[in-house]
Image (cartoon, helix red, strand yellow):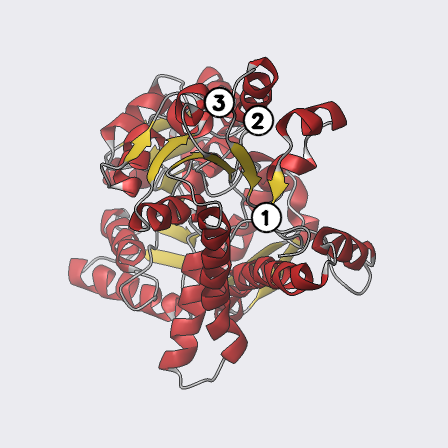
Amino acid sequence: MSTTAADAAGAVAVIGLGYVGCVEAAVLAASGRHVVGVDLRQAVVAAIEAGRTPLTEPQLAERIVSGRTQGTLRATTDLADAVQSTACALICVGTPRGPEGELDTRDVLSACASVARAVPPGASYVIVIRSTVPPGLYALARARIATTLAERGVRARVGLALNPEFLREGSAVRDREEPELVVYATEDESAVAVVESLWGAHRARLVRTDPASAEVLKLVANAWHALKVAFANEVARVARPIGVDPFEVMELLCRDTKLNTSAAYLRPGMPFGGACLVKDVSALEAFARAEGVSVPVLGAVLGSNQAHLDHLVAAVLARAPKRVAVVGIGFKPGAPDVRDSAPVMLVLALLDAGLEVSVADSSVIDARVPPLGLLALEAALDDPRARAVESVAEAVEGADVVVVAHPSEADRRALVALWTARRGPRGVVLDAGGELSRKLSEPEREVLAPVVVLRGRA
């Protein structure tokens, strides 16, 4: 795809083609916007250029094919070329968790500087940061852009805006195309029209705020989601000794959507994990600590999450198994992502207890691009006693206990089929978070006879 001068006026560069960047680029291109995706990973660029999705995400492949077919989507490793072919850049690079829990923003600041370095003399350009950032990043980015332009000694105008993303792995395309709320912040009026144009028909949902509020909003939102998970799991642990069904309690609580907010995340289950919740709770706590602000509830969330993991490990060890199979290793059911995955932490704890552990997850194994896929799973486990295998059948063979953590639909069906066909001894099935039982029919429940760890008396 070549971008003409006329196209460039509305063309967008997307810097960083991970989950956020890939979805952003594909959705915009499918809608008819000219997009140039930029990533340092040649494999990712090559996949998009070939019309293939580099990530396992519903509807993403169709959007990429649409963009390539229309001639509105291309990808490159050349950031300067992308900037010079477009009018604005969306910064979607990662901000991983640092050693003290803080967000590492070096790549975001570096991307802003690289864009400013590539803007043609005399041009007007806008940078929109979609990455999750800590408080104070907007000012740092603005200063870095100004310094870069001054070092070049050229006259160019580069506006800056924040537009935090609220995409969930597994529904990211739908979340981008059907947003509930879109928040942005800028001190450059030239950036307002650019952000509005990015959201097209969803302009009515746009809310402008100040940079500091936009920075903290994403962290607070994910801290809230993490808190809901930890709260529901604490309810489960309190309820068990007195024989109260925590699922029933939380279901009743969630029926009041006027006062008790939405039901999302508010059910007992596995500890939370993934690329966002652990990192963002940690980042918010780190920021508060640096500012000398006491946040005892936030400070307890990760500890509560670990206590819940310890509780599940104890439930497995109480069965005195020698060999354990874990089915569903992604950070949530059906997800191929193992970053900060609670089931991975569970496996490592069982290994430390001296058990043999085999792991199966078709969603993870089917993924092929780092940090996903079988190689990432093996790297996350990083212990020769843990066997990452190709199928549920291979994983459960000879296991005393089968722990079902975050099962995909395919793995759930495979487990039911195996138990239905098997006539000999079968290991006990521990439904660690309730994900399995919630989706079983009554006949399937009779076949598997799962023990729901969080339901019933201790």
Mark closer to the chain start, 3 or 1? 3
Along the polypeptide, which appears first: circle 1 or circle 2? 2
Tell me: residue 399, above or below residue 458. above
Which dot marks residue 293? none
Q: Residue furthest top?
A: 421
Task: Give the percent coordinates (x, y) of residue 421.
Answer: 58, 13
Quadrant the N terminus occupies: top left
Depicted 343 relative to depicted 297: above or below: above
Crowd tier of the residue under label 2, counting other residues whose Cα lies within 10 Å: few below 14, some 14–19, many 20 or above: many
12 or 392, which is in the foreground?
392
Above or below residue 440? Residue 202 is below
Q: Residues within 10 Å of mark 3 (few under 14, many from 20)?
A: some
Q: Give the labeled residue for mark 2.
A: 412
Secondary-structure class at tag 1: loop
Q: Position of residue 384 (x, y in %)?
A: 22, 36
Residue placed at 58% from the left, 46% from the top? 433
Which image quarter holds the C terminus?
bottom right
Nearer to us in this view, 438 or 134: 438
Amino acid type, mark 3: Ala
Q: CA distance from mark 3 to mark 1?
A: 37 Å
| Residue 453, disc | 1
Q: Secondary structure at mark 2?
A: helix
Q: CA distance from mark 1 to mark 2?
A: 17 Å
Read off the residue under disc 3.
61
